[in-house]
């Protein structure tokens, strides 16, 4: 297809035979090289689903099954970003079209659908996955077929794939600054670590424990409960017995609802901060299920809260509500998902091509000054530089931001001394 | 096997069914679809192993197991352990704190390979374990249940509990099992890349071959005395017992056989999909497998294969076209099956298609006169 030329400015598409076309192409190239959008042959040398005026990408999240409640926000954010990019003229003059697939909260399905997106649909990028398990399931597929995945969730780290851009925080970015803050600002000395039983809470708590012990402080207990667990009375009794200054919680999903309700019912008033609850897993989305009155007073360590007051975020929240309804809340992961299409657009434009290899090469150093969380930058290790913020949960289901790291925190997926 | 024996094993109507299925799986599908879709069909077929086992247990023997995912999972995990060990050579895992062990063990602070992983360095052991471990496990469950005359609903509930227990065990012991992520990132089998298109073709045909082996065994069981006893047990267990048969042994045998089929399916799943996870072991997939069997027709082993194919194909295409609504469509399909044709696809076939085909054959034979006579004599001799 080396002869195809881009004729969109005049609106007519050439239907001439190959030879004439190639002559015209040569002529057109000579005269229009500076003004015309870049030709198809140049922006796509690997057979991706790119045409003269469109480019196809994939959205791969669970919209059914147990994870749907968490992942829906990400789907909405990605669609919003794509629509906004299209309204601005698209990427390299091409409108983005998305193919949405349902991972159905089932890891083999994720693998199947990612293979379909890459092999059948030949999409130029995929925005998707949420749980670590789903990412682990699709990772070999992306590496085999050389696709590009923008993964939005904060996660455990210990991974750095050339085929993934991690737009959420890896564990140290979320945890270290949070613990430092609670030690400095609240004079905490003892910690109780609690999490759901899978890789993310376990790795997070491992990092937290190492950090706490480095600071010369004490972990008085560490417990895990199966996903979906709803009986937290025994651990609440342990809190009462061991009286930790901080309960460091990484309970996920529906278990949160039971945990915070039972904590309140057991007479632990989180607004009194004795003990103080510091969570890394409850975003505004989860509070919808927990109920603001049940989590009032807890602290969360995240990179984004809906209540951020910078200009970018005010515009983002407004656009999000206009698109998806006034009742909607925006959590940390939703914002990270929103970054995906924008980071991809920036990388494609920097590369001047949709080719995965070129986009990958152009990705490190890509900056986004329009991110709702503020300024972000892609690190050579494919994670983002970002700030850590501490929010204090209020009864209306929003967080009041009480602290923000002054500097961007460098992503460090394989932290030395924490493994 | 003698010709007469073969004829008893495969009466003409069954033989046609087998031949049609073989043509579809070996010739039509590989020619009609690209390797991506063929790989998916290969995946669907791995569920057919389970469904065929269920036809024997449930359709023939009346033993409803809601925990076949356990055996599917054990087979799949066996294969995955072998492949994971191969993928975790010290060179590949040099960045870990302890090179040479699977990555998830390293993340969970294990510093050496657990003892029960050691034998999975050997492919021979792995292949044997894939069939024997689930069979043995089924034997233990079978002895514990059937010898005490636990049956029916109670048995179904217990198998479901076993499925739940195994899932919780796998998720909880993530240092040893990979936890909720499962065992992922499997690359090679004895140095041969299992992710290449060539490998996918080979696995597909291997899967079809093994499926026909299982179908052959299942057909043999159904046509043998054992098969008739199973049906008798299903209809009136006490009468069989009073006739002097040890009912529990037959039940244990067929349950173990179903488990072995499921395990082979699980191993083929791992090879074709490239990973194994606890989502395939639990209650939901176990019940789904029963649904494949029910849609296909629980009395027909071939129906079970079609059931697994049709349901999964519908699942894939519906979810591709309607990512947010497909589950409702699936639900509607299941309700329709149960309401409209309780004997599944096989029931539809024998009710509408078979008489038509028979009649056609009859009129065709009538045209050839002599042959019909010979046929008739042969039939009478049986």
Image (spheres, rainbow, N blue to C red):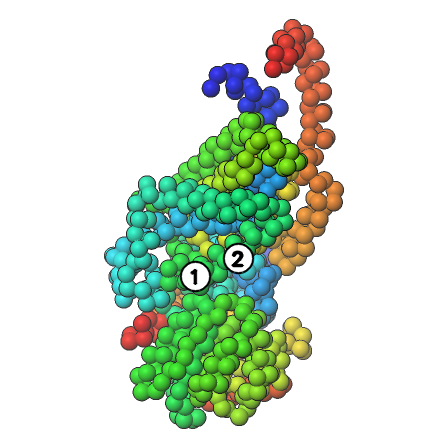
Q: Are marks 1 and 2 on the same chain?
A: yes
Residue at image coords 57%, 39%: B57
Tag 2 or tag 1, which sits nearer the N-term?
Answer: 2
* Residue B93 in the image, given as x and y percentages of width and height: 28, 60
Instruction: Note whether B41 is above or below B2 in the view shown.
Output: below
* Badge 2: chain ID: B
Asked if one can make out residue B268 in the rendered structure from this viewpoint, the answer is: no
Camera-side residue: A186 or A235? A235
* Residue B147 in the image, given as x and y percentages of width and height: 53, 43
Q: CA distance from mark 1 to mark 2?
A: 14 Å
* Residue A41 in the image, given as x and y percentages of width and height: 44, 54
Q: Kindly identify which numbered label has been placed on residue B179.
A: 1
Secondary structure under the numbered disc 2 in the rendered image: helix
The crowding category of the residue bearing disc 2, from other C-alpha atoms within 10 Å (few below 14, some 14 to 19, many at least 20), is: some
* Residue A208 in the image, given as x and y percentages of width and height: 38, 79
Instruction: Note whether B200 is above or below B370 in the view shown.
Output: below
Of marks 1 and 2, the one in the foreground: 2
Q: Residue furthest top?
A: B370
Q: Which residue is mark 2?
A: B164
């Amino acid at each position: 297809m080396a002869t195809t030329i881009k004729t969109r400015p005049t609106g007519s598409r050439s239907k001439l035979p190959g030879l004439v076309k190639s002559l015209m192409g040569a002529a057109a190239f000579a005269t229009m090289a500076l003004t015309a959008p870049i030709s198809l042959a140049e922006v796509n040398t690997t057979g991706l689903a790119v045409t003269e005026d469109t480019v196809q990408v994939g959205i791969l999240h669970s919209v059914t099954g147990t994870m749907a409640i968490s992942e829906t926000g990400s789907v909405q954010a990605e669609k919003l970003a794509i629509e906004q990019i299209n309204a601005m003229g698209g990427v390299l003059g091409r409108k983005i079209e998305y193919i949405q697939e349902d991972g159905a909260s089932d890891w083999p399905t994720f693998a199947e659908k990612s293979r379909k997106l890459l092999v059948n649909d030949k999409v130029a990028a995929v925005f998707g996955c949420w749980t670590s398990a789903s990412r682990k399931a699709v990772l070999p597929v992306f590496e085999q077929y050389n696709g590009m995945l923008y993964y939005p969730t904060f996660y455990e780290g210990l991974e750095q794939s050339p085929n993934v851009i991690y737009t959420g925080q890896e564990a140290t970015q979320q945890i270290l600054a949070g613990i430092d803050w609670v030690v400095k600002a609240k004079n905490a000395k003892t910690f109780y670590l609690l999490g759901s039983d899978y890789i993310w809470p376990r790795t997070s708590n491992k990092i937290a424990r190492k950090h706490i012990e480095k600071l010369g402080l004490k972990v008085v207990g560490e417990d895990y409960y199966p996903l979906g667990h709803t009986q937290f009375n025994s651990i609440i009794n342990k809190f009462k017995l061991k009286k930790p200054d901080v309960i460091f919680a990484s309970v996920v999903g529906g278990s949160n609802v039971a945990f915070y309700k039972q904590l309140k019912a057991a007479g632990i008033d989180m607004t009194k901060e004795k003990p103080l609850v510091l969570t890394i897993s409850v975003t505004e989305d989860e509070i919808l299920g927990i109920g603001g009155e049940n989590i009032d007073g807890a602290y969360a360590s995240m990179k984004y809260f809906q209540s951020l007051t910078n200009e970018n975020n005010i515009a983002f929240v407004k656009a999000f509500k206009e698109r998806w309804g006034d009742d909607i809340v925006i959590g940390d992961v939703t914002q990270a998902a929103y970054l995906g299409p924008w980071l991809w657009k920036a990388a494609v434009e920097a590369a001047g091509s949709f080719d995965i290899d070129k986009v990958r090469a152009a990705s490190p150093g890509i900056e986004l000054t329009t991110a709702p969380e503020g300024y972000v930058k892609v690190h050579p290790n494919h994670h983002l530089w970002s700030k850590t913020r501490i929010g204090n949960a209020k009864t209306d289901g929003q967080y009041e931001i009480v602290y923000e790291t002054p500097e961007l925190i460098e992503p460090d997926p394989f932290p030395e001394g924490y493994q | 096997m003698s010709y007469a024996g073969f004829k008893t094993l495969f009466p003409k109507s069954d033989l046609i069914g087998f031949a049609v299925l073989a043509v579809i799986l070996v010739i039509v599908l590989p020619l009609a679809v690209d390797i991506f879709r063929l790989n998916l069909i290969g995946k669907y077929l791995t569920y057919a192993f389970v469904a065929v086992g269920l036809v024997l247990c449930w359709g023939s023997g009346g033993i409803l197991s809601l925990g076949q995912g356990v055996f599917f999972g054990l087979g799949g995990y066996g294969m995955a352990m072998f492949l994971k060990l191969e993928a975790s050579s010290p060179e590949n895992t040099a960045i870990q704190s302890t090179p040479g062990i699977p990555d998830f063990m390293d993340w969970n602070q294990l510093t050496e390979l657990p003892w029960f992983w050691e034998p999975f360095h050997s492919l021979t052991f792995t292949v044997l374990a894939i069939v024997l471990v689930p069979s043995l496990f089924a034997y233990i469950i079978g002895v514990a249940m059937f010898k005490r005359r636990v049956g029916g609903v109670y048995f179904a509930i217990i198998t479901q509990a076993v499925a739940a227990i195994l899932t919780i065990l796998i998720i909880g012991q993530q240092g040893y099992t990979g936890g909720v992520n499962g065992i992922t990132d499997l690359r090679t089998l004895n140095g041969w890349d299992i992710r290449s298109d060539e490998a996918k073709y080979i696995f597909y045909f291997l899967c079809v071959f093994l499926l026909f082996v299982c179908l052959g065994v299942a057909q043999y069981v159904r046509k043998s005395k054992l098969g008739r006893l199973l049906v008798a047990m299903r209809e009136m267990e006490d009468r069989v017992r009073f006739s002097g048969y040890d009912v529990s042994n037959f039940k244990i045998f067929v349950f173990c056989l179903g488990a072995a089929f499921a395990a082979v399916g699980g191993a083929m799943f791992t090879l074709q999909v490239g990973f194994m996870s606890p989502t395939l072991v639990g209650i939901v997939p176990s019940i789904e497998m029963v649904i494949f069997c029910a849609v296909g027709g629980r009395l027909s082993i071939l129906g079970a294969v079609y059931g697994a194919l049709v349901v999964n194909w519908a699942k894939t295409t519906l979810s591709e076209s309607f990512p947010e609504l497909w589950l409702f469509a699936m639900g509607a399909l299941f309700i329709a099956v149960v309401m409209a044709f309780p004997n599944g696809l096989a029931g539809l076939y024998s009710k509408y298609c078979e008489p038509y085909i028979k009649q056609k054959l009859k009129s065709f034979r009538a045209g050839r006169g002599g042959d019909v006579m010979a046929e008739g004599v042969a039939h009478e001799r049986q």
